[in-house]
Amino acid sequence: MVHVETLQSVLREHLRKRILASGNMVPCDFDQPTLWDQLMKTEFLSPITAFAVMNDFKPSRFAECCIAFALSLDRSSQARWFNAYTRTIFFAGNPRNLSTRLSYTYLSNDGSIGLIAPGSKMAAGTLRHLLRPFHVGPPHNGSCDFTLNVPGAGAGSLWTIFISVSGLTGSQYLIHLNHILAEGLFVGTIQPGDTLRVCSVPSLTGAEPGLVLLRVHVDQQHRDRLKCYAAIGRPDASV
């Protein structure tokens, strides 16, 4: 069994690399009990935020939309959003009912999910005025396990997306799924033509063999520690 402090060291290194990749050169002492406050200050240096309007909890449909949305952004928008840690605010509502007031960057075919590119201050004000935050309870068994294909032609690699669901609400699940998919695309791990197998698991240490990209953030239950919430792994990754 790997010692807890060794695992924390692994997660701190992954988070340090992610912060450096964003270009936000802010000192962050990952060993201090004020880790949560430090990380929040680092993440919110940039006002860039994407927005999602959803009328139901549909993980597979959302994953498809997330990928299509991320791929639709130009390189400049992708870079700005990546540097803002792919921050996204989720609202509950019927996207089609707001189509005359909002300009969606991507709207699902069934109209159940609308996504707006980061940087729209008008969208932020309108959404906060009209809609409440999207909240849903713990995900149902099996609803978070599915397979999808990334649009486009390419090598056709197979990846497994692991989401640690223990203690998460459905809303929090979507947040971490959104982060790992978008950032996996932006750093080039996920490519057009790839197949993604999304799996919910009770927990991730971040040190499992075969993992190539981690979503690391503060543990909500122990805010002086980090937690691996999601990861991209090779087909033979052992979790």
Image (cartoon, helix red, strand yellow):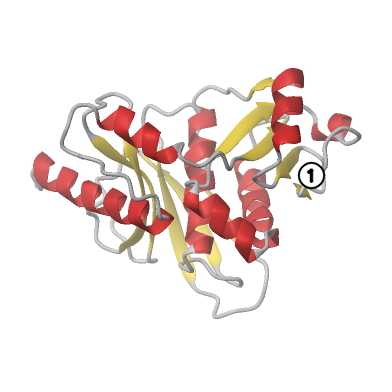
Residue 182: x and y in percent read 54, 54
Residue 81: x and y in percent read 56, 51
Label 1: state its secondary structure: loop
Name the residue tied to disc 1.
104
Residue at the (76%, 26%) spot, across then down: 126
- Viewer-proximal residue among 197 and 114: 114
Position of 140 with respect to 60 (left or right) is: left
Position of 158 with respect to 214 (left or right) is: right
- Viewer-proximal residue among 159 and 224: 224
Residue at the (65%, 52%) spot, across then down: 64
Residue at the (54%, 45%) spot, across then down: 178
Residue 148: x and y in percent read 60, 58
In this rendering, does residue 194 appear at all? yes
In the picture shown, does residue 96 fall above or below 12? above
In the picture shown, does residue 190 fall above or below 87? below
Dividing the picture into quadrants, the one containing residue 156 is bottom right
Residue 223: x and y in percent read 26, 26
